[in-house]
Amino acid sequence: MAKILVVDDEVNVRKLYSEELEREGYKAFSAATIDEAIEILEKEQPDLIVLDIKLGEESGIECLLKIVEYRKDLPVIINSAYSVYKDNFQTWAADAYIVKSMDLGPLKEKIRELLEENGSRAET
């Protein structure tokens, strides 16, 4: 079973995404802050991360750079309500950029695609 970490400061988004991902057959973890995300990253070794850009007072871009520094091979999907960050060169370190919407289909499809590309040891 692939493990996915959802990093978002909004509790309802974390809950919704975790429930949806678990319905898809993944093991989901969630974090609201950069520190929580790094702690889970080190402890659980997720296969993929879904990351928001705005993490309260923290920056998802800062979190992305820490993730890449920690594990370059880990697929990261930026999932933000703000499409403007798509043009920020720092977000290019992510494997994909999905604009948040009520339809989680594109996010789920990108997750499947990236896990297959990376030959996840824990495919669903």
Image: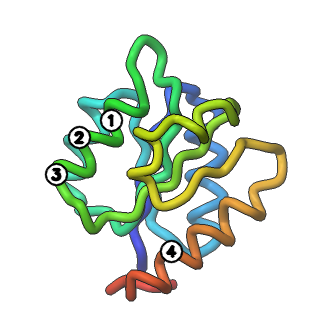
Q: Which mark is residue 118?
A: none
Residue, disc 4: 114
Q: Does residue 89 appear to the left or right of 42 in the view shown?
A: right
Mark 2 nearby-residue class (10 Å; few <14, some 14–19, many ≥20): some
Q: What residue sits 43% from the left and 44% below the top?
A: 30
Q: What residue sits 40% from the left and 64% below the top?
A: 75
Compared to residue 47, the image places residue 102 above or below, namely above
Whole-number angstrom distance, CA of label 2 to CA of label 1: 5 Å
Quadrant hosting residue 118: bottom left
Q: Which mark is residue 66?
A: 2
Chosen colour scheme: rainbow
Residue, disc 1: 63
> The N terminus appears in which quarter of the rendering?
bottom left
Mark 1 nearby-residue class (10 Å; few <14, some 14–19, many ≥20): many
Q: Marks 2 and 3: CB-CB under 8 Å?
A: yes
Question: Which of the two residues, 16 or 116, is positioned nearer the viewer here?
Answer: 116
Question: Which of the two residues, 54 or 84, is positioned nearer the viewer here?
Answer: 84
Secondary structure beneath label 1: helix
Q: Does residue 124 appear to the left or right of 23 in the view shown?
A: left
Residue, disc 3: 70
Compared to residue 92, the image places residue 111 above or below, namely below
Q: What residue sits 63% from the left and 72% below the top?
A: 24
Compared to residue 29, the image places residue 53 above or below, namely above
Q: How many marks?
A: 4
Ranked by sequence position, the earlier of labels 4 and 3 is 3
Secondary structure beneath label 3: helix
Q: Does residue 43 appear to the left or right of 49 in the view shown?
A: left
- The extreme right residue here reads 102
Amino acid at circle 4: Leu
Q: Marks 2 and 1: CB-CB under 8 Å?
A: yes
